[in-house]
Amino acid sequence: MDLTAVAKPCSFGDKGTSDVVLRLRNSEGRPEWFYSHSSVLVSKSGFFADRLSNPGSGSCIEIHCSDSTYDHHVNLLRLLYLPTNSLLDSLDSVQSALGVLPLAIAFRCDNITNCCIQYLEAVPWEEKEEEQIVKEVLKLGPVAMPILARIQPVDLSATKSVFISAVRFATSIGGSCPPFGDELKTSAQEQVEFMLGGDEDTPLVTADDEVKSVVKSGLSQVCSLFENELSSFLLVPDITAETAETRILQCLSDVEWMCNILPKMDLMKDFVCSWGEMSRKILEIVEDKKLDNAMWVLKVKLIEVTGKVLEAVGYGNVILPAPCRVQLLKTWLPYIRKIKPLLDAKADEDTDFPYKMDEDLCQSIEGAIVSLVLALPSNDQADILSDWMKTEQLKYPDLSEAFEVWCYRTKSAKRRLREGLDRVGNTTISL
């Protein structure tokens, strides 16, 4: 076959001008013949250039393909006949480009390979397509890696910058951005939680002093907004107004969100301290007579957040001095003891009453309180247990376990004291 002849204009499948026949097996297993031209194949494909340069190659080339790649093989052959500047426009879907790309690489069709890579790098991907693209590109090796530019890991400084911006938005540092401020803030909060997942760069970002400073500012911001909204609530003429209630619950939701993410940054102690500082004021407001039969959802949410604080302190995840632990208990224990039977009574009156302390919440709070009490100095334990036994609400939280341990420890302490005094006395006599 004379490969030096001057190429004449030709089109794919033109039997009259064809000097090479390509033999493919179709999806039904029958061979299918494609009339082609050596001038096109040689100039566009390294594979065909090598095959046709062999004097014994003949005018028929058989190409083996699977059912799943048959259409992509045909598409590749058609693309060989297009001008280079038309290749990119001829690609019309991620699936077609992704199917042609490995064949273009295998047949060493450089122009088609480059166009497929450029196309896949630029167009949007569906979620399922992204998974498939990543899988295929990893098979193809370095030549196709530019396709994955959009999902390559960024450097630490860029990650830190994005994280800080997301925290600022999530905590409304600098103010909200109407008219879509709440929606965007919620989205930012979700992204911060996602970024705090188990990524290997997460500890490096969260340990950064600037990041911690911004997060602490965010905590201060959300706590301040919640406290201000709650303080102004009693001044609202109609406390049942939906707008005022919604604002307070949104602020509390932001506080709860901070409570959920700060343990992942080793900053839960900051939250516990902030919650302790504003607890007394919070309870003064929610226990106002105007709210006796209102804002039940707020009251339950406050207990849920407090439960997380009690767990953090009670199980030793946050270390506080004994006076602070005593203050935390004495502030919230009476309220929990008061609100639980009220919620139960409302639920008994109305089976559709939605605001309850579920069993898991009750058990976690009770366990945390017992653990917290048992870690206090003996005299403080005595004060809390004495107060518990004076109330009518002995059932919840049930501190009988803490009381039993306190009694045992008290007797043991007296016995150890007597034994110590006896040893001292015996030593004095022997001298």
Image (spheres, helix red, strand yellow):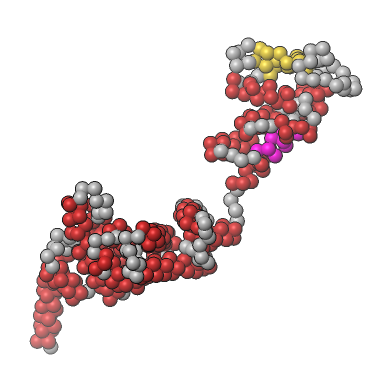
Q: Quadrant of the C terminus?
A: bottom left
What residue span does the magenta drawing correspond to? 110-120
Residue 326 within the segment the image draws in magenta:
no
Residue at left offset 57%, top offset 61%: 161
- Residue drawn where x is 12% and y is 81% of the image: 421
| Nearer to me, 430 or 78 | 78
Q: Is residue 119 above or below residue 30?
A: below
Between 228 and 4, which is closer to the camera in this rendering? 228
The quadrant in which residue 22 appears is top right
Looking at the image, residue 280 sits to the left or right of residue 201; the answer is left
Residue 167 visible in the snapshot = no
Quadrant of residue 223 in the image?
bottom left
Q: Position of residue 186 (x, y in %)?
A: 46, 55
The vertical placement of 380 against 62, above or below, is below
Give x and y (percent) for residue 115. Answer: 72, 36
Seen at 48% across and 60% down, the residue is 170
Q: Nearer the viewer, residue 164 or 268?
A: 164
> Magenta part mainly helix, strand or loop?
helix
Q: Residue at x 90, y 21 (%)?
A: 5
Residue 97, image x and y in percent? 66, 32
